[in-house]
């Protein structure tokens, strides 16, 4: 592969592929967990634009507040650091204060299959710096999750309401079961640019472009500490699981990584040209200096 990315030191670097001419490069950064996740994500956004030529940054922020929820100050920090849009998930309302943000801001969404009265937009349309509009929606799965409305009906409703000129459409399917995620991928194939999974925190190796042109992956992975159990410190989780002795599951600290998935989209028809997993350790991110 030829390196066409300016500022990179090593031409054999294959952490991300070359960007096809004319493509809009979108990344979905996976579940940001706690302070370590928030720090690496905020540090990464500017570098993702500069080195990886990302045009649009979407992040799932449902675990930013000590592992569950998102505070107003964390929302502001993510926006100031360059995120374009945010999705959440089952932990959406763990911090009650976020309801104000969800009601007032236009760059953050609730799962579209939540009740209409629940605080938040069922989708948002953000304008990338290059002038292209991108629609973002989130859906919650129904297997081993809280009872919610039908995600397929919700997806249809949202897609009908998106103006035709907005071709790039990204769907975060926040679900426990890979079957829930694959079913949604096939249902929306050819109708959205990407169906990308979150919630399970473990990146999956099934990234592909489905037959009608939608990029798909079961889970883009967690952004946070990997020396952990899904982002939480190992010992308390192990102890409680084995002994039933109650413990608080605090966020772990070590081996912090950014995990997400890049989708290059043809802006004229909204279909995916390429999908690539991105998994950066803190050290690798620090080494991206352009020198
Ligand atoms: Fe979740
Ligand atoms: Fe999560």
Image: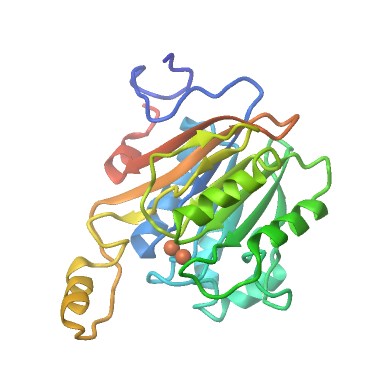
Residue 71's spot in the image, x, y percent?
Answer: 51, 72
| Residue closer to the observer: 138 or 8 | 138
Placement of 240 over or under 149, stated as above or below: below
Placement of 118 over or under 166, stated as above or below: below
> Which residue lies at the image location 30% right of the left edge and 68% below the top edge?
251
**Hey, which quadrant is residue 111 in on the image?**
bottom right
Q: Is residue 82 in view?
A: no
Render colour scheme = rainbow
Quarter of the render that holds ligand 2: bottom left
Q: Residue furthest top?
A: 2
Residue 93's spot in the image, x, y percent?
Answer: 54, 76
Placement of 29 over or under 138, stated as above or below: above
| Residue closer to the observer: 113 or 183 | 183
Residue 180's spot in the image, x, y percent?
Answer: 52, 56
> Which residue lies at the image location 35% right of the left edge and 41% below the top edge?
280
For the N terminus, give its image quadrant.
top left
Q: Is residue 111 in view?
A: yes
> Along the horizontal axis of the image, is 210 left or right of 245?
right
Residue 114's spot in the image, x, y percent?
Answer: 65, 71
């Amino acid at each position: 592969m030829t390196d066409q990315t300016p500022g990179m030191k090593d031409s054999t670097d294959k952490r991300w592929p070359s960007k096809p001419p004319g493509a809009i490069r979108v990344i979905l950064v996976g579940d940001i967990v706690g302070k370590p996740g928030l720090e690496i994500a905020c540090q990464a956004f500017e570098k993702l634009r500069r080195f990886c030529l990302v045009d649009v940054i979407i992040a799932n922020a449902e675990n930013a507040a000590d592992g569950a929820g998102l505070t107003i100050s964390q929302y502001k920090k993510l926006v100031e650091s360059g995120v374009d849009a945010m999705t959440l998930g089952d932990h959406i309302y763990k911090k009650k204060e976020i309801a104000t943000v969800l009601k007032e801001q236009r760059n953050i969404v609730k799962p579209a299959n939540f009740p209409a009265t629940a605080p938040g937009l069922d989708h948002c349309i953000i304008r990338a710096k290059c002038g292209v509009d991108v629609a973002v929606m989130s859906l919650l799965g129904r297997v081993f999750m809280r009872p919610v409305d039908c995600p397929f009906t919700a997806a249809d409703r949202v897609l009908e309401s998106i103006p035709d000129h907005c071709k790039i459409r990204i769907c975060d399917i926040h679900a426990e079961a890979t079957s829930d995620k694959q079913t949604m991928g096939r249902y929306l194939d050819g109708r959205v640019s990407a169906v990308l999974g979150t919630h399970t925190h473990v990146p999956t190796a099934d990234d592909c472009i489905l037959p009608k042109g939608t990029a798909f992956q079961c889970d883009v992975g967690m952004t946070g500490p990997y020396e952990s159990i899904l982002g939480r410190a190992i010992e308390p989780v192990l102890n409680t699981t084995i002994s039933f002795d109650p413990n608080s599951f605090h966020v772990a600290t070590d081996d912090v990584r950014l995990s997400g998935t890049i989708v290059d989209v043809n802006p004229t028809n909204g279909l995916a040209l390429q999908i690539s997993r991105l998994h950066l350790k803190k050290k690798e991110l620090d080494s991206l200096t352009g020198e």
